[in-house]
Amino acid sequence: MPKLTLVVFSGELDRAFVAFTIASRAAAEGWNVIMLFTFWGLGIVRDPDKAVTKTTEVEKMFDSALARGADDLKLLRIDMLDSATTMMKEQMKAKNMLSIRDMMREAKEFGVRFLVCNIPMELMGIRKDEFVDEVDEVCSVGGYLEEAKDADLNLFI
């Protein structure tokens, strides 16, 4: 069985769309797929209903800058008025495409494993209990490298 790993570094709507599209397609075709969410990508797998009180100024800053779940993603970082994001989400709906949250659920149904990286979690003050239930584990860089070393394809998005 071929193996694919995706490092999801970006927390933007368009990149999350691409990451989940590739992951689901590969898994549907029988690939072993692992997605590692790190830095801004951690916002994709945050659960908006599991807010945790932040105590330090750094934690508060990252909490406000990081998306609170898949439905909170923006199309572009410079999309100040949300117009591009709104238009893209409307277009996705009009074309009968899944939302990012639904794409995440679909990927899990296909057997995609979701890992979150512990180093940015520590830096940003993110706790394990802030993530959606689909997250399989918190791992170190070494844990990811163990998965990636025998992969047929490694992507960074």
Image: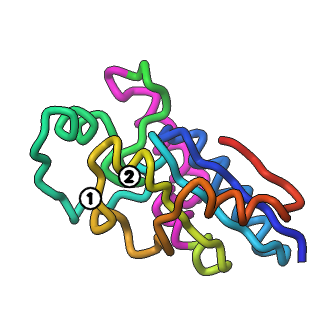
Q: Quadrant of the N terminus?
A: bottom right
How far across and down, in percent of the image, does residue 127 sit? 29, 59
Secondary structure of the residue carrying numbered label 1: loop
- How much space separates mark 2 and mark 1, taking CA atoms? 9 Å
How far across and down, in percent of the image, does residue 40 sit? 45, 40
Ranked by sequence position, the earlier of labels 2 and 1 is 1
Segment tinted magenta in the rendering: 80-105
Residue at 36 percent across and 29 percent down: it is: 82
Residue named by callout 2: 71
Residue at 30 percent across and 52 percent down: it is: 126
How far across and down, in percent of the image, does residue 86 sit? 41, 36
For residue 83, side relative to residue 65 (left or right): right
Prevailing secondary structure of the magenta residues: helix
How far across and down, in percent of the image, does residue 41 sit? 49, 46
Q: Indicate the amino acid at tag 1.
A: Pro
Residue at 27 percent across and 47 percent down: it is: 125
Say if 61 sits above or below 31 in the image: above
Q: Indicate the amino acid at tag 2.
A: Asp
Say if 109 sits above or below 70 in the image: below
Residue at 44 percent across and 25 percent down: it is: 77
Tag 2 and tag 1, C-beta contact below 8 Å: yes
Q: Residue furthest front?
A: 142
Q: Residues within 10 Å of mark 2 (few under 14, many from 20)?
A: some
Residue named by callout 1: 48
